[in-house]
């Protein structure tokens, strides 16, 4: 890779397009996310969808549509395409005639789809000569940043709410990140980074506060379309925190259409949140352009406990332009969904992933999704990182084993 096709960056809010490629960028002058723009005619002339898709596994195969300029800056921990798992038993049990597909992102390095965004952000940090990265995290982003940063000799400083899943906190430390527990929420952690970055010489890798995590998450849209034979599903349910993936996929569909890789059909994009933290759902229902800070945010689905998102308007635009909607589900519905997917299909999902199935069931009930549609649910992380229901049955080897009781269990 000796050249790439980035032309410039532009402000996602104002459309101002005078942001130069190849230099360090944070937010736009309007304080909003920057979007990377490409010479798509150049990409079209240079390659084809089938040539790209035939490359070996993982999101780096989409390099013509990614911002990294020099191949030596790619950071890799063995990425692969994530599988589409068709849930025919869940469907049959509920007389669903369409298709329920789980895209299982838990298979990526560091066990979540954060690997996509952070691999790109870290590679670009490397390319631009940054040496100290910092971020607030609910767990998986910090894990992905620390692993990729360590893999290329960059330091990482990470601040997480003190009730972040323990597996994530330990993982970050074990992957060489410097991690602090903070007695606040992710936005409080974000303030620590924002206030300290100048003094500490950190580059702020917070969600959407630099331009490249979106580009990494965009590869989910490219990959799923290729996996469906260059088609898109009718509906995508996405567990929405900062919204990087939803925004990224929406951008991917546009770029692919301009390249002639897919047609004009778009999935209805559904932003799924928890009732204990649903700023995007509230803004969607009120017809607002931006979302207000959510007070007293709580849900055990840590990845979507995000009270405020700097890209709120990009999420809401994608949801509305696609004809989708935003929907909240409570923690009990999330846990029921997780148990149903596990015990019926044998698929381990994380709470955030389970939330998408709970939201799908609610949308079937209220008629916003029909039983004959093809829906894709994002399982964004590996469920092993989260608390699971305790196994309580036991046997006492000093007594005879009661096999009939086992048979009836
Ligand atoms: C980060 C995260 C989310 C939210 O993703 P965004 O793209 O930031 O909205 C959902 N689930 C899990 C497990 C996460 O780690």
Image (cartoon, grey):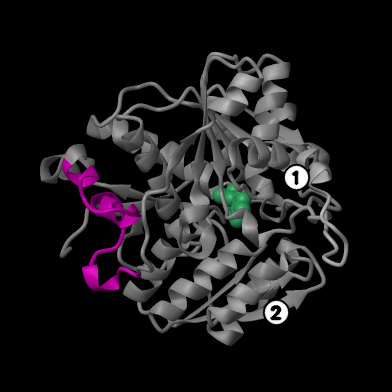
Image position of 120 (left or right of 147): left
Question: What percent of the width, then of the height, locates residue 19?
Answer: 37, 57
Q: Which quadrant of the figure has residue 261?
A: top left
Residue interval drawn in magenta: 51-75
Q: Nearer the viewer, residue 277 or 367?
A: 367
- 109 shown above or below 407: below
Residue at the image point whose x is 71% and y is 63% from the top: 186
Point out the residue furthest to the front here.
400
Image position of 36 (left or right of 315): left
Number of disc labels? 2
* Labelled disc at residue 292: 1
Tag 2 secondary structure: strand
Question: What percent of the width, then of the height, locates residue 1?
Answer: 17, 63
> Is residue 335 visible to us here?
yes
Q: Nearer the viewer, residue 374 or 395?
A: 395
* Labelled disc at residue 264: none
- The residue indicated by pointer 2 is 180
Residue at the image point whose x is 39% and y is 38% from the top: 224
Residue 207 part of the magenta segment = no
């Amino acid at each position: 890779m000796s050249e790439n096709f980035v032309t410039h960056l532009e402000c996602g809010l104002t459309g101002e397009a005078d942001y130069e490629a190849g230099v360090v960028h944070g937010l736009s002058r309007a304080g909003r996310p920057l979007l990377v723009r490409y010479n798509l005619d150049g990409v079209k002339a240079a390659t084809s969808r089938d040539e790209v898709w035939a490359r070996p596994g993982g999101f780096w195969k989409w390099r013509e549509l990614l911002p990294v300029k020099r191949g030596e800056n790619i950071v890799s921990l063995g990425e692969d395409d994530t599988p589409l798992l068709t849930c025919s038993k869940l469907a049959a049990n509920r007389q669903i005639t369409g298709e329920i597909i789980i895209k299982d992102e838990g298979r990526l390095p560091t066990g979540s789809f954060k690997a996509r965004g952070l691999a790109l952000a870290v590679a670009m940090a490397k390319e631009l000569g940054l040496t100290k990265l910092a971020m607030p995290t609910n767990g998986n982003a910090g894990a992905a940043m620390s692993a990729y940063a360590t893999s290329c000799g960059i330091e990482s400083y990470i601040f997480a709410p003190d009730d972040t899943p323990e597996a994530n906190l330990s993982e970050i430390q074990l992957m060489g990140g410097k991690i602090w527990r903070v007695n606040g929420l992710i936005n409080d952690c974000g303030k620590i980074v924002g206030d300290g970055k100048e003094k500490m010489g950190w580059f702020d890798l917070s969600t959407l506060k630099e331009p490249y995590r979106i580009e990494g998450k965009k590869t989910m849209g490219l990959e799923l379309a290729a996996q469906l034979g260059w088609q898109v599903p009718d509906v995508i349910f996405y567990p929405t925190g900062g919204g990087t993936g939803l925004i990224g996929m929406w951008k991917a569909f546009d770029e692919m259409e301009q390249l002639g890789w897919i047609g004009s059909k778009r999935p209805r994009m559904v932003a799924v949140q928890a009732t204990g933290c649903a700023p995007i759902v509230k803004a969607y229902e009120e017809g607002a352009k931006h979302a207000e800070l959510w007070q007293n945010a709580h849900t055990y689905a840590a990845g979507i406990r995000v009270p405020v998102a700097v890209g709120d308007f990009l999420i809401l635009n994608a949801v509305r332009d696609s004809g989708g909607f935003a929907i909240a589900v409570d923690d009990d519905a999330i846990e029921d969904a997780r148990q149903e997917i596990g015990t019926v299909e044998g698929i381990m999902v994380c709470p955030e992933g389970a939330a998408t199935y709970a939201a799908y069931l609610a949308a079937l009930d209220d008629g916003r999704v029909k039983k004959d549609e093809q829906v894709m649910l994002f399982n964004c992380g590996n469920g092993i990182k989260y608390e699971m229901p305790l196994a309580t049955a036991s046997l006492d080897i000093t007594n005879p084993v009661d096999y009939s009781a086992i048979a009836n269990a």
